[in-house]
Image (spheres, grey):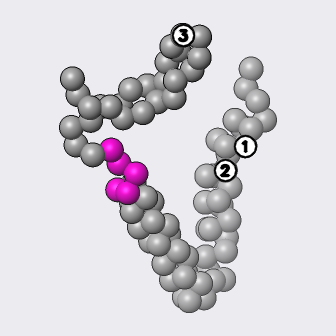
Amino acid sequence: MIGLLEIALFLAPFALFTVWRVAAPLLSPIIVWSAIGAVAILAGTAGWYMRETRHPKGVIYVPPHIEDGRIVPGHAADRR
């Protein structure tokens, strides 16, 4: 059964596009360039975070698993 959240997530891009098309002629260039700058900063921050949290070369990811009745969280381990 499709929930209300799934429907809202599906319709959100269409609603944002409609708001953009209606509001675009009314916006000043400074607001548009500020929004472009904000998106660029967000993309740069996401790239930096991805680079900082990456595992080093030569290790593999071990997914979470159950060991002796307890859950062992996922982690990086050396190749053996």
Give the Cα separation between the discs numbered 3 and 1.
Answer: 42 Å
Q: Quadrant of the C terminus?
A: top left
Task: For the residues labelled 1 and 2, say whether their Cβ atoms are less than 8 Å apart.
Answer: yes
Residue 13 image point, x, y percent: 61, 52
Magenta stretch, overall SS: loop
The secondary structure type at the circle numbered 2 is helix
Give the Cα separation between the discs numbered 1 and 2.
Answer: 6 Å
Residue at figure coordinates x 78%, y 35% from the top left: 4
Q: Which mark is residue 8?
A: 1
Tag 3: amino acid: Asp
Which span of residues is magenta-colored? 51-55
Q: Mark 3 points at which residue?
A: 68
The secondary structure type at the circle numbered 1 is helix
Q: Is residue 36 visible?
A: no
Label 1: few (<14), some or many (≥20) within 10 Å?
Answer: few
Task: Identify whether 53 is placed above or below 73.
Answer: below
Tag 2: amino acid: Ala
Task: For the residues labelled 3 and 2, say whether their Cβ atoms are less than 8 Å apart.
Answer: no
Q: Mark 2 points at which residue?
A: 12
